[in-house]
Image (cartoon, helix red, strand yellow):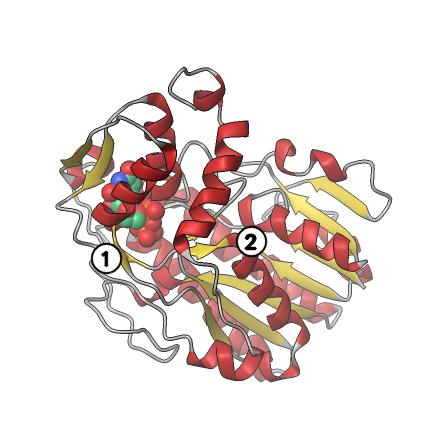
Amino acid sequence: MKILVTGGAGFIGSNMADRLLERGDEVYVVDNLSTGSIANIKHNLGNPNFHFLNDDIVTSHTLESIIEKCDVVFHLAAAVGVKYIVDDPLGTILTNVRGTENVLLLACKHWKRVVIASTSEIYGKSRGGALAEDADRVLGPTTVNRWSYSASKAIDEHYAFAFHQKGLPISIVRYFNSYGPRVNEAGYGSVIANFIRQAFAGQPLTVHGDGSQTRCFTFVDDTVRGTMLAGERTEAIGEAINIGNHHEITILELAGIIKRITGSSSPIVTMPYRDYYGQNYEDTPRRQPDVRKAQGLLDFTADTPLEIGLEKTIQWCREHYAVALNSHHGK
Ligand code: UDP
């Protein structure tokens, strides 16, 4: 098949492009290299089945010609990473709302199947319990930049459902804290990248708040597999589906595991949220997916254990992070 992956030079998108190529698909990637990078795709640049366009989905004039020739569109291009979003809410809203609008309008014009990558951030401030896809969303005020990400992605989802009401075959996948090889060293998308970088550098692992907040970390191979299934199964059409690992862990526990696997002598310290995100920040205390819908509709479980996924991730980071390559602490 011919497949477009928007954001295909990013962390999840580039892993997905690799799997699609392995499967024998012809892959088109459109990416503006904002948080994605050539390094993520350079091994594919000579492959005749791989086509890369450095372009922005908000302003692109060539997107249409690519969508026209593709069978399925995986729309992963987005402003991602809480820190990035807090620092640039305008860019977040423009990219996530206008970009998705462009993709959906063109997909509708040429009547293509679309999978929209969404986020567990949709659910907002969860205080515990597995989040089913039809759970209420609990958001803070619009004066808190963080919620612009959740709101922008919610608009994307509403758009997608509205197009589906017109008959367009869309699916939505909601990601839960993906991590793995190619996770951005700057830490945009992940506390895991921050902790690994700090561990390599022999710097303190900075746990925000008291570290009792929880997340469910999903290995990128699982994230990609779930997304590809959503693009294949007819049962997924018109549905939003959680793609996440069920195992919940506190951020303090996570710091301890990363310290142990890296063999780092870094201390683990706590720091106030405002020292990292500035004033006016709100965190999500707990976040865990209800995975029954993914199991039922896609026959999918994100089953890579955290320790295994972290070992693979840390190995990759050792070989690629500048801080590891330049540091005596990166063993
Ligand atoms: N976090 C942390 N130290 C860091 C980066 C993040 O303690 O250096 C915390 C963050 O405050 C949040 C959790 O780790 O409670 C997950 O953050 P991340 O940005 O990875 O993803 P989120 O789930 O918040 O979108």
Q: Which of the 4 image quarters holds residue 68?
A: bottom right
Classify the position of the C terminus by image quarter: top left
Q: Residue at x 77, y 36 (%)?
A: 45
Q: Which residue occupies the extreme right position in the image?
A: 48
Residue 70 appears in the rendering: yes
For the residue carrying disc 1, how many other residues have a C-alpha within 10 Å: few (<14), some (14-19), or many (20+)? Answer: some
Which mark is on residue 284?
A: 1
Question: Is ligand 1 less than 8 Å from the beta carbon at label 1?
Answer: yes
- Which residue is at a point 18% across and 47% down the rendered structure image? 211
Kindly identify the residue that appears in the image at 87 percent across and 44 percent down. 48
What residue do we see at 60% from left, 84% from top? 235
253 lies above or below 285: above
Residue 173 point in image, percent of width and height: 51, 67
The answer to the question of whether label 1 and label 2 lie on touching residues, with beta carbons closer than 8 A, is: no
Residue closer to the observer: 59 or 247: 247
Q: Which of marks 1 and 2 is nearer the N terminus?
A: 2
**Label of residue 99 in the image:** 2
Q: Is mark 2 within 8 Å of ligand 1?
A: no
